[in-house]
Amino acid sequence: MAEAPSGDDAPRGPSAAAYVAGLRAFYERGHEFERQSLDEAGTERALALAESEGRLQDAASAALALGVFRSAVGRSGEAAAALSRPALEAGFDDPSAAWPPFGLIAKLELARVLSQSGDFAEGMAVLEKALSHAAAAGPAGRVYEAHVLLSVGLVHGIRSEPVPYAEHTLRCLRLARTLGHARLEAHASVNLAGAYLTLLRFEDAAPLYDDALQRSRSLGSRRLEALVLAGQGSLAGMTGDLDRNEALVTASNEIFEALGDGFQCARQLLLFGQTALDAGDVPRAGRALERALALTEAGGFHAVAGDVLAALSCVYEREGDPPRALATLRRAVAARAAHADARSEERLRTLEVRHQLTAARREAERTRIAAAALATHNAELAAAVARIETQARDLRAILECLPDPIWVLRAGGDAWLNPAAARLFGLPAGELIAGDPLDAPGSRLVPTPGHREALAFEAARRSPVRLEGTRLERPGASPLSVTIQSVAFDFEGAPAVLYALHDLTEFARLEAEVRRLDQLAALGTMAGGAAHEINNPLATIQGNLEYLLGDLRRGVEPPADERLQCLEDAAVAARRVSDIIHALRTFASLRRPTLSLASAERILRASVASARPTFRRPHQVWVTCDPELELVTGEALLVQALTQLICNAAAALESAGDVAGGGIEVTAVYLPSGRVRFEVRDEGPGIAPALHARIFEPFFTTRPVGQGKGLGLSVCLGIARALSGTLSVESTPGAGACFRLEVPASPTGGATMPGASPTVSAASPR
């Protein structure tokens, strides 16, 4: 029994028989195959022994294994020698031999080696022999015929011959589909997509790449996946997406490096560098091509070395280094001359034309996209202009239909008037006139000082302004009471001011008539109330006097106490009439008060002091006010009004049956609006909501007959209005009432802001 080898004699891979079996499974059934793993030393010994003993089939098997292995590890010369051994030639030349197709596989692998080394003519001759041999082998040779077609197309592709490249690859694809060879079909799809790229048929290449990528991943073929990624990168680069091109080439080369395929790495870097150079990205092209050159020199891939050097010479020229560019170009010429074939010059011209076509197509695509974007933009602008013109026409139509006079004064001094403004000033409508119509002879705003200046000042600030209470005088027409509003804006591309005038003459007349009628109605109501209030005490006076006069006429002298009672009742009634007349005089004498600086706290305490003597029972009165709160107002009138409100609050507490302890709260607070609010709040029975609107009417009272004149709240309301303030009530039945008197803190709306916290004090009942 032979001893197992050890040390350096130990096998480092499968035997030749196992290696060739895997190679046949790869070609015939599409199985994965590891080319870089072989017991090389053992295979060399097996080859020598088989040749010495005349066992041609075993010798062919060993020679085939050595040739494929050495090609995979980059030893092209040794690979070509092994694949040309006599045993393989004998098996190939004798179709009648019952050997496995070692010779046919050897021709395919030899053509691959020759093409990568740049010997295209010899490689194509080998493939043509292999194609005729496979066709003569019948059904058993169909799968190899497909492989030969794929290799022939690939050689045409390397030689930049896109049409035969596409034709042979398409024949391979159809045959692979007929045979059901999924891996071969996927490879053919990738190569056909590459041919379409060369022919600039991008729309045909994209779906082929997508289908091939899906097939490669379902088959688990890393090499095929790398080829697809590289092809998709080329497609991205040729359509202008250089970043995606670089990313896909990087991904594919990571797989090729893992598989040890330096030739494909160099080829993909060359293609990317040429694309980047066409796109004008010289730095990126230079980096890719220098890496490709290093790979070609390390692996001896002379087929692509000349192209890489030629492209690098263009990079150096664009970088402004002519000496380096010239030296590199000479190296490229030398490399191409050393490995030229009969069609090398044609291939170089075709390659140059392809680059020019790619750049032209890319530029045309960019121009088309830019033109489409420009057309879209122009259409959008045209639509926007049409909308603006429509809006302008609609706005002009609206302005012309408005009943109020409107005109636009432009910076140049001319003005546009709507029909209403034209009628008002007696000017033509719908056309520009010179100057502001307010400056027409005889037209003026009264009062002029301040009004036109305000319009001009606010127009300069582009702030809207509204002038009320203005009178417009025109020649030959009655003056008009008007309100003018103006706002600055851009009219037809130039600064302008729009004026809108509203005629208030008729409104003012109607408003004056309404005020007159209201005054007559109020006077009638007051007269009726006064007559009613005065009639009762007059009846008392009249009744007592007539009683005494009747006794005197009859000569009867009434008792002294009876006479005294009659006179006392008449005197009380006379004082009642005097009080009513005094209240009427006070109500009628309200006029604009004399204003002075007053302390809010002083006003409240004076009001409480004035009201306290009228209390029928003792009540608590709380005063809450900031001692520093001051206002400019009519102090005497405020004290009079607040005194009346406090008296009313005390009367409300007494009407509820309060004996003692009932409270009244009096407060003063400053409001952010620049006003001061005085409040008088009681804990009485409250006021029904239905009476809120009537309690301020003259001679209206809710007290029993003889206890109230009904003028207190009317006088308070008159005082509030005289001070430019307001008087309101808030009350809920059973929860007391709160009267609020608000007045400006100063005539201009300003205020003396309080500086300390409010203090609360309780006044002791007297």
Image (cartoon, rainbow, N blue to C red):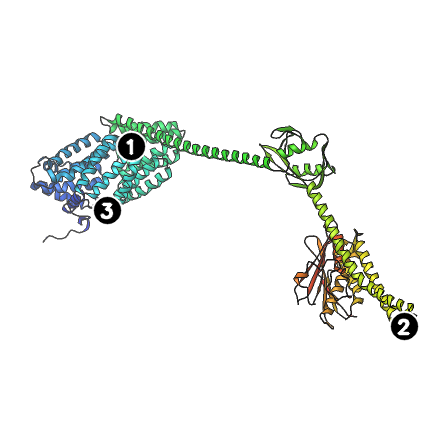
**Image spot of residue 294 (x, y percent):** 31, 37
**In this picture, residue 530 sits left or right of residue 262:** right
Q: Which residue is mark 3?
A: 219
Q: How far is disc 1 from disc 2 in space, using C-alphas?
A: 146 Å
Q: Which residue is mark 1?
A: 198
Quadrant in which residue 211 is drawn:
top left
Q: Which residue is mark 2?
A: 558
Decide which of 571, 693 is in the foreground and name it: 571
| Of the image marks 2 and 3, the number of the one nearer the N terminus | 3
| Of the image marks 1 and 2, the number of the one nearer the N terminus | 1
Decide if residue 78 is in sight here: no
Decide which of 708, 314 is in the foreground and name it: 708
Q: Is 409 rendered above or below residue 728?
A: above
Eye-nearest disc, 2 or 3: 2
What amino acid is found at the position of numbered circle 2 in the picture? Pro
Binning the other alpha carbons within 10 Å of mark 1 as few (below 14), some (14 to 19) or many (20 upward) gives many
Q: Residue at x 23, y 40 (%)?
A: 187
**In this picture, residue 71 sits left or right of residue 426:** left
